[in-house]
Amino acid sequence: MTERLTEIPAQPANDVTSDGREHPLELDTAGMRALVAAALERIVAHVASLPSQRVSDTEGGAELARTLAEPLPETGTPVPELLDLLFDRAVKPTYNTASPGYLAYIPGGGLFQSAVADLVADSVNRYTSVFTTAPALARLEANVIDWFCQIVGFPGEARGTLSTGGSLANFTALFTARRERLPDDFLSGVIYASREVHHSVAKAALLAGFPERSLRSLPVDERFRLRVDALEAAVAEDRARGLTPFLVVASAGTTNTGAIDPLDEVAEISSREKLWMHVDAAYGGFFLLTEEGKRAMRGIERADSIVLDPHKGLFLPYGTGAVLVRDGQALRRAHALTADYMPHMQSDPDLVDFCLYSPELSRPFRGLRVWLPFKMHGAGAFREQLEEKLALARLATERIRGMEGMEILAEPQLSLLAFRLAPAGVDDAEELNCLNRRLLERVNDRQRVFLTGTMLGDRFALRICVLFFRTHRDRMEEGLEDLEAARREVMG
Ligand SMILES: Cc1ncc(COP(=O)(O)O)c(C=O)c1O
């Protein structure tokens, strides 16, 4: 293999240029094949070894990073050297977000099928932001949006766009709500969310022009869900002060504990108080493919806008979020600007110019990375995976509950739970937090699973979030074994 790799020159000769001359940036057909083959060789070896790789080890990473700073390279480097740098050095000191043991934060995915779709999309490189320039490809992306609308229960007139992730999708939703519900002079507008909402919502509000004083951070109940009585009281108070309540953001799976706000009740209040209801379902949304998820998120279909994160719940590689808006024309009204130099835009609502529904103009053909795996495997394959994750979270909860001194702080409402060690006789809050930080370190030191912690009020909690297509029962059992061993150690 090494022999073959070293055959690839930095600047392969060219057999496809129109002027018959060699241009190094235009790879010839053999060069293209050799480059992909060389990369693929490394990729496949890497992916195949994921289960045996360490799950989080950044040792030496900062030092390596410093050595990699370099001035603009004037000449090329042979591809094997570059692949060695990537795979043998740079990829190594990382959190292994593609490991079956990655149960930290909200796991991303890394479907290889989507990586292949990206290769196709980027190689074809068509302009899918404007319908005229790539009608059939734009339609494929529109199918993806329609499928998502179907998953959340939105009507046919709903529209949406794919973004880079949940943060920008939240921004697009908040901006749309502002443009729809408030005048140009919008600073009397007030936004409501629980104190557990993802911080990208506050960022989105700032980006949409609101000062911090426009945000109300509301209390939660014992299951970390937005308290609707607090929402009602805050809206009434703000109205009495002459302000304009206009937007409530509910969570369908918070990052801290996986809490799902009472969506039906929030929808009731929203319709009574004429609030735009936005649901951040970046983590939880795709569990709507399962019956359990549908029950847990009942009422989500009443929202005005919803954010989903395919790079979470559909296991895609990082870089794809989605915003869906029930009244698709509201999304369009908020973003529909064009110019004389642009191609003709469509008036038929079935022929979507994505640039009229999004803050972006030029952008990658993101739809293909969702479309290809859905078409290859069908929704059933995703449903099955998600059901497995729900079951694994339940299994973990029951096992942890059975470990001496362990306390479940947040039962899984989907696939995320929070817990801590609270042995009898240890009452001091700081002592308990230190004990649990040690517990977390000891679990992670074993390198079979990677967990992260959070603060729930003044209590430090460990979290398990199961949302990765490579995580199955075998790895969960290993993680639970490690947790029990670590618990014994810190109690020791
Ligand atoms: C509930 C929730 N909302 C929004 C986001 C932001 O999404 P992204 O990281 O894709 O920008 C996250 C990220 O973890 C999240 O968990």
Image: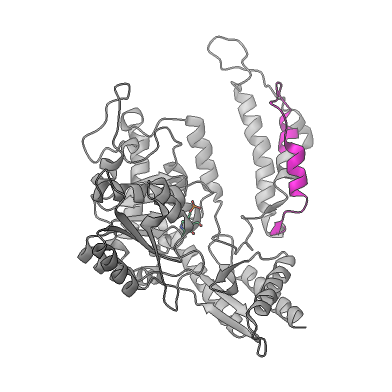
In this image, 32 relative to 186: left or right?
Answer: right
Q: Quadrant of residue 253?
A: bottom left
Image location (x, y in percent) of residue 401: 58, 83
Q: Quadrant of residue 26?
A: top right
Q: Identify which residue is drawn at 74% across, 37% down.
A: 68
State whether residue 309 appears in this view.
no
State whether residue 26 appears in this view.
yes
Quarter the N terminus occupies? top right
Quarter the C terminus occupies? bottom right
Q: What are the residue bounds of the magenta stretch?
A: 54-83
When the figure is inspected, residue 175 is found, relative to residue 25, above or below; the finding is below
Residue 20 among those drawn in magenta: no
In this image, 16 relative to 334: left or right?
Answer: right
Image location (x, y in percent) of residue 165: 47, 49
In this image, 254 relative to 189: left or right?
Answer: right
Image location (x, y in percent) of residue 149: 32, 54
When the figure is inspected, residue 316 is found, relative to residue 473, above or below; the finding is above
Of residue 157 and residue 259, the one placed in the foreground of this image is 259
Q: Identify which residue is drawn at 42% across, 64% down.
A: 287
